[in-house]
Image (tube, rainbow, N blue to C red):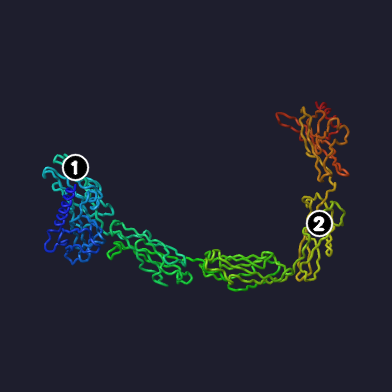
Amino acid sequence: MEIGVRILLAFLLHQVARVGGQEDGGREGCSPGFQVKRYQLAFTGSFQKGQALIQVEFDDCAGNEDVQFEVSDPSFFVDGDLNLVPRQDVLRSQPVLSIHGLSAHADDTAQVEVTGLPAQSPHTLRGVLGVGQTLPFRSKRALLIPPMIVTENQRAPFPRKIGKVISTERLGSHIFRLTGPGADQDPKGLFTIDIDTGEVSVSRSLDREAIDSYQLEVSTTDFAGNLVEGPALLLITVIDQNDNRPIFKEQSYTGEVLEGSPTGTTVMTMTALDADDPGTDNAALRYNIVRQSPDKPSPNMFYIDAERGDIVTVISNKLLDRETLPTTTYELEIVAKDMSGSEVGLTGTATATITITDKNDHAPEFTHTLFEARVFEGSTGVVVNLTVDDRDDPDTGAWRAIYSIIKGDPTLSFKIQTNPDNNEGMLSVSKPLDYEAKAPHTLLIKVENEDALVPDVGYGPSSTATVHIAVLDVNEGPVFFPDPLIVSRMENIPIGSFVASLNATDPDILQIQSIRYAVLRDPAGWLSVSPVTGTVNTSGSLDRESPYVHDNKYTAVFIATDNGSPPATGTGTLVIHLEDYNDNAPYVVPSIARVCEDAHDMNVAIVGGRDKDLAPNAAPFKIELGKQLGLDKTWKVTRVNSTHSQVMLLQPLKMANYQLPLLITDSGVPPLSNNTEIKVQVCVCKKNKMHCSSGPSHRASLLVLLATPLLVLLCL
């Protein structure tokens, strides 16, 4: 296996030197590119970082301005003196290094053979070559296929030779074939193979960010198309160029940091992406702050970690004071540069806006230690607005004030609320004040924030204030007691009877005033009042059954007026509970009943008694036939219960309307009776329909009942 590896390496060096030597070889005079295409470098155990190993010869025939070099192994670079230099200590190297030189006038590649390397297993060699594939192998017959590399973004002319496949078969007896994606499959035509020599070429510029490697198959066939060798794998790796700028995920970032935060507090993280090969410096990003606005109190208030992109505070926690800074918002311009931040790196830019947020490090303070107000007794509403100063951020919990009354309001006559528009405390009277009870009031008010203060800040004396409230006297109206006044009286008592005595007093005890009474509202007009004494008498008959009486109660309103200046009034209510008197006769319901003339059941109706009076002046009722002669021969009334009785026919009647007289008596003392009638319609009933007479009613006397059949016979 080691012999095969050595053959492969020697062959690869030979092919690279041959390809380099063929490019641009036909030009007269200066030949742009590497003047020497192949170099040798002895490996002595390690390459030290920064050590100039060899100097390459490159001339673009135009002064070598803006020449860029790229080494296949990112551990190396070419410096300004054209020296191959390790970026870091290299303990193991690839056996072949490819150096790509590019300028406006030249595009060329040279190879460096590293000698003296320790023997490597095939697996290790595969890793050094960076192809991630197995080594070239032989199929049934030998095809030697080295891995090939192509630098992306190469310029014309094309095609360019990138390597050669060797066959152990006799030349001229077979042809080479190249198949797979990039050859005869999409993207078609990128790579071609000389059917006679096995030389592989790239036909146009490649983009590593689109496809970073190609796996093709090489085989040989005879002229009849029969397979001779292979197929065998050909791996072509696209070498990255730094052709992509870093791009931030967002163009504008926002972050916050609490005022007073310690130095080194992380504010936010900036993140940029680079589409180039992440295994090379082409995608190795470094971050930097290039501008801070504003730059006060220091142009370096923040620092960004070059590799991680973390923005942290540099300013001390004492200076990071939102109330003393010139602004609460700072804008940073952040640049991300690839090539590990070197001068030749490409850049991307974004902005970071950092807001210094507030913490509750300032207690609210009253603008005055004493506030004064005047209020008329008996009134309510806001009497004074208390003002405070708070240096914290407005419209936050650290600024919004909460007021409380901590002394001077045992009767809870006051309340205080915060005005959301200006943070002032609105002190108001919630219960009317009484000048005669207490003229001046002194309150102690405390103000706090919605949010708790930071541990090293407390509420001081300026967070409390005193409020003096002077109560002004007004002429108050008389007050009735009790209100309402409730009495019980029998209905129908004689006019002029005593009902009640009103009692109204003047709250202005410091003044001597007289009171006069008058009726304000007497719906039925039953009452009168003495203007001086307040005695209420009847001026009409009290009727419990009146529509002005509800639930046996009659309500009237009286007014009392003092002789103050100006006069003041007060109202009081009198409720009379009316006791029932048996002054309403009972009556019978319903007033109409129907019965079929041929009915077998002679029950006419169930009738009941009604009475506007209350028990015991109502039920039980006695319902009986009227006193007319002969009614009991045809009709019968039977008691059902205390309120209802049953009316029955004792013999059939012809179709007609009859007025049946009834007598109903209540249970009052003395009882009241009522002679009434119900209309009984005797109807012809057919097919569940009743056909009743629309003529006048007959009196249900014996004479009428006997005359009716006779009239029928005479008509026949």
Pinpoint residue 599: horizontal percent, then vertical percent: 76, 28
User: Can residue 522 be seen?
Assistant: no
Q: Quadrant of residue 45?
A: bottom left
Q: In the image, is residue 94 above or below residue 470?
A: above
Give the residue number, with chain letter if any, for mark 2: 525
How many marks the image carries: the answer is 2
Say which label, 1 or 2, has the lower sequence index.
Answer: 1
Q: Amino acid at mark 2?
A: Gly
Q: Position of residue 194 (x, y in %)?
A: 15, 48
User: Residue under circle 1?
Assistant: 139
Marks 1 and 2: which is nearer the front? 1
> Is 482 located above or below residue 165 in the figure?
below
Q: Quadrant of residue 50?
A: bottom left
| Most foreground residue, 698 or 359 | 359
Front residue of 251 and 704: 251
Q: Amino acid at mark 1?
A: Ser
State the image coordinates of residue 521 (x, y, percent, origin top left): 77, 59
Q: Is residue 505 shown above or below 160?
A: below
Residue 437, image x and y in percent? 73, 68
**Element class at badge 1:** loop
Q: Marks 1 and 2, how far apart in space?
A: 130 Å
Name the side, left or right, on which 637 lies relative to 126: right
Question: Quick check: can you spot residue 133?
Answer: yes
Q: Residue at x 14, y 54 (%)?
A: 18
Task: Classify residue 661 as left or right of residue 169.
Answer: right
Give 360 or 184, whichever is nearer the viewer: 360
Which label is found at residue 301?
A: none
Q: Secondary structure at mark 2?
A: loop
Q: Residues within 10 Å of mark 1 (few under 14, many from 20)?
A: some
User: For mark 2, does the 10 Å Cα neighbourhood hold few (<14), some (14 to 19), or many (20 or more) residues?
Assistant: some
